[in-house]
Structure formats: C-alpha cells, structure tokens
Amino acid sequence: MTDIRDALMVGRSSDGRLVRRPISPHLQIYRLPMTAKLSISHRISGVALAAGTLLLVWFLVAAATSDAAYATVSSFLRSPVGYLMLFGWTAALWYHFCAGVRHLFWDAGNGFTLPTVRVTDKLVPGAALALTILTWLIVLLAA
C-alpha cells in the first residue's frame, strides 16, 4: 500500500475475506432523498422570504412617504420583473408554511413512518403550488 487512502479502503466482508470498499460515496453516485431535498428547499425558501420582505418594506415606506414614492414602487411591482418577484415571494411563503407544518407534526412525534413520509414528500410541494396558484387567481380576479 502506497497511500493511506489504500489502507482505509481495505475492509472485511461478513465471511472474513478482505475486500476493497470505497471511503464514502461521491456526489455523482449518492442521490439525496426527497426529504433532504425538501429540507434544503425549506431553508432556501426562508432566505427568499427574508429577501422578499425587503420589497414589502420598500412598499410600506413608500406608501407612508409620498405619492411619488408610492407611484415608483407601484410601477416597479406592476412590471414583469415585479410580478415575477412577487410570485416567487408568494411561492416561497406558501412552501415555507407547508414545510413548517410538516415539521410541526414531526416535532410532535407524528408522521415518521415511511409511507407517511412518502406522502408528505409529495404533499408539501403540491400544496404549496396549489396555494400559490389559488392566491394569484384571487389577486388577479379581484384586480
């Protein structure tokens, strides 16, 4: 053995034979489970909510400042980029809410069985998408 990594890759099988084994799976081989992807997305949506809240603050400050400031914010938010940012903020809000409800159930000790986890793996993004679309349908039909 010429390298310490070679020594680390030597192991024994269940019947006692020497075998070469990998140190750990590489990212090209290892596939994240859906639960891990949803957990990472939950954290990302929290960051997106914090960034999107700056839009809300800008809107509230402009509304309290003057008509000209409000018109500037309103024209930006009614642009395609503004609508895209508001849609993304709404999607992040609903996704974070749905994933948070899932975590609340987990904190109470419920929903850890594999069939339940698989159902909620699909339910969380589906409910977030449905609530986002419903919100925007209500907003656009009311306008």
Image (spheres, helix red, strand yellow):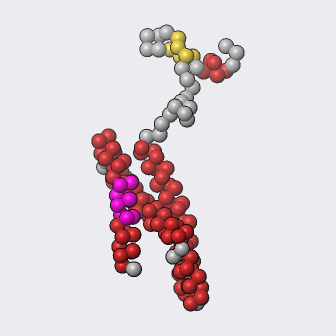
| Up/down of 92 relative to 70, above or below | above
Taking the spot 54% from the left edge, 20% from the top edge, the residue there is 21
**Residue 86: where, in percent of width, then height?**
49, 69
Taking the spot 34% from the left edge, 67% from the top edge, the residue there is 134
**Left or right position of 141 against 65:** left
Queried whether the magenta region covers residue 131, the answer comes back as: yes
Instruction: From the viewer's side, name the closer residue of 68 and 104.
Output: 68
Instruction: From the viewer's side, name the closer residue of 20 and 93.
Output: 93
Taking the spot 39% from the left edge, 80% from the top edge, the residue there is 143
Queried whether the magenta region covers residue 72, the answer comes back as: no
Taking the spot 55% from the left edge, 23% from the top edge, the residue there is 22
| Up/down of 105 relative to 113, above or below | below
| Up/down of 26 relative to 130, above or below | above
**Left or right position of 21 against 36:** right
Assign the N terminus to one quadrant of the image: top right
- Magenta segment, principal secondary structure? helix
**Residue 82: where, in percent of width, then height?**
53, 71
Residue 57 can be seen, yes or no: no
| Residues in magenta, as a range | 125-133
Residue 44 can be seen, yes or no: yes
**Residue 95: where, in percent of width, then height?**
42, 59
Instruction: From the viewer's side, name the closer residue of 143 and 34.
Output: 143
Farthest residue to the front: give it. 80
The answer to which quarter of the image holds residue 127 is: bottom left
**What is the total number of numbered labels drawn onto the structure image?**
0
Farthest residue to the bottom: give it. 67
